[in-house]
Amino acid sequence: MNDGPIGVFDSGLGGLTVLQALADLLPGEDLVYFGDTARYPYGDRTADELLRFSDQIADLLVAEGAKMLVIACNSATAAALDHLRSRLDIPVIGVV
């Protein structure tokens, strides 16, 4: 695994609790967080929208050097976890 950060994303700010838990569990790791407040909430979005949003955010975090992704959003995890796992060359973890 590379020395890049662990990328964490959510549809808003709720994922900051996941970020804090990771910081507590993995104090030596760098973390980067993306809260998609511009398109919040995700709950009423279609599966296609959630896939598109998740792809965009994942690509951004990977471009920033993320060595792993944590989807800290129930809606995005349900819609995009398997898709991102098959598409990316880094581990992807969801919260569901």
Image (cartoon, rainbow, N blue to C red):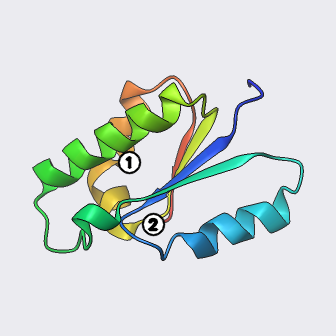
In whole angstroms, how far apart are the C-alphas of marks 1 and 2?
Answer: 9 Å
Label 1 with label 2: CB-CB less than 8 Å: yes
Q: Residues within 10 Å of mark 2 (few under 14, many from 20)?
A: few
Which residue has dot 1 on it?
81
Describe residue 82's horizontal placement relative to residue 71 as left or right. left
Instruction: Tell me what residue is drawn at x 58 percent, y 71 percent.
Output: 16
Label 2 sits on what residue type? Val
Image coords of residue 83 (percent x, y) = 31, 38
Using the image, determine if residue 58 lies above or below residue 34: above
Residue with the mark numbered 2: 96
What's the mark number on residue 91?
none
**Residue at the location (73% across, 62% down)?**
22
Total labels drawn:
2
Q: Position of residue 18 (x, y in %)?
A: 61, 69
Q: Is residue 2 above or below residue 10?
A: above
Q: What element carries label 2?
A: loop
User: Image point 38% across, 29% down: which residue?
Assistant: 86
Specify the amino acid type for callout 1: Leu
